[in-house]
Image (cartoon, helix red, strand yellow):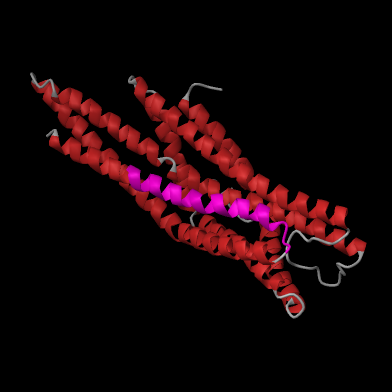
Amino acid sequence: MSTRASDNFNEIMRFVRFITSCVGFDVYDPNFHFSAVTITVVALISMYFIFTILTIAKEFHGNWMFMIQASAMSGSVVQACAKIYMGVSSVETVSKLYVQLNQNYTHFEKEEDARYSMALLRSCHKLRRFLVLVGISYMVGALGMIIVAVLASILTGKLYLIMHFHLPGIDVNTEWGAWATQALHCVCIILGGLGLYTGDMIIIVYLMQSFVYADILQLKVDHLNALSENQDSTEKQLEASAQLINIAKWHQTYTRFIDQCNDMFSVLVSVQVTTSAVCIVITIFSLLTSDWIGGYCYFCVLVPNMYLYCILGTILENCVCLSQRVADKAMQCI
């Protein structure tokens, strides 16, 4: 692994853009447009809603718990729709911020003070760890739902569907119909997991950069403090004044970055936390009152997913408070 912060960041972003490309939503590209993959994903989401409504209408009188279980999984589809809207409507902002972040890493890793490079590398480490943890939660949930449902169906001889919709014209009570439905469910679960992970990655990448902005601001103020201790010449005074202006400009850049992130993600985060909380309650109720075996794996996705955004919100708030304290400290040096 390279010791250069920019190389580390670019390596992470290559992985992120590969995943986003797999579901047709590489919104880091300023020339992003709908591709065949994008249309396929949107078509699957539309199909899910239509087929689920039709299936609920058919099954409701005989099994009302089916509707409850379907409602729990529909929460994730609502999240997917919100993430798609956020990504498509914010392509210009996402791509511009991506260029800005690249410039930050390339510029500050060249600073003579080694603490700049250490701060950037530390940020890359945190970002990589966050992305891996979230990816594992989605992988465990998606593969768990598939494997548990398939194994239970094979071992018990009773059909356990992965998702809650039937294909029109296909009888799930026949062996061929059951496995054809399961196969489509597998495709939907895998693409759905990748899609949700894609949306999360876009948010995580940008919100985790708050550490970079806050750390650099702190280092700039430390440099100003060192200059303010030695004001025995006009040259030193001018250098301190220039550094103070530099700090003010960086603080403005940081504030604009936070405002842009807030504009992009505030509604999405609200939707994410709200739907996750509601789905957790519905899933717990379903697990206690029915035999939805895939619900346990789905629950393992919902809980980390909700707390992820709570943690990211706390991180962002702490970084903003820290930057304000640092800026106030810089003003005291005047």
Left or right of 321 on screen, residue 55: right
User: Magenta includes 137?
Assistant: no
Residue 223 falls in image quadrant = top left
The image position of residue 103, as x and y in percent, is 42, 34
The image position of residue 42, as x and y in percent, is 66, 61
- Quadrant location, the C terminus: top left
* Foreground of the two, 71 or 259: 71
* Foreground of the two, 160 or 176: 160
**Residue at the limit of the structure toward the bottom, as seen here:** 61
* Foreground of the two, 8 or 94: 8
Residue 250 falls in image quadrant = top left
Q: Main secondary structure of the magenta part?
A: helix
- Relative vertical location of residue 183 with respect to residue 204 in this rendering, above or below: below
* Foreground of the two, 304 or 182: 304
- Which stretch did the figure color magenta? 291-319
- Relative vertical location of residue 278 with respect to residue 128 in this rendering, above or below: below
Q: Is residue 113 among what the camera can see?
A: yes
The image position of residue 296, as x and y in percent, is 67, 54
Residue at figure coordinates x 71%, y 55% from the top left: 189
Left or right of 139 on screen, residue 119: left
Q: Is residue 35 among what the camera can see?
A: no
- Relative vertical location of residue 39 with respect to residue 147 in this rendering, above or below: below
| Numbered-mark total | 0
Left or right of 166 on screen, residue 217: left
Residue at figure coordinates x 24%, y 27% from the top left: 222
**Residue at the limit of the structure toward the front, as seen here:** 288
**Residue at the limit of the structure toward the right, as seen here:** 175
The image position of residue 193, as x and y in percent, is 65, 51
- Relative vertical location of residue 178 with respect to residue 316 in this rendering, above or below: below
- Quadrant location, the N terminus: top right
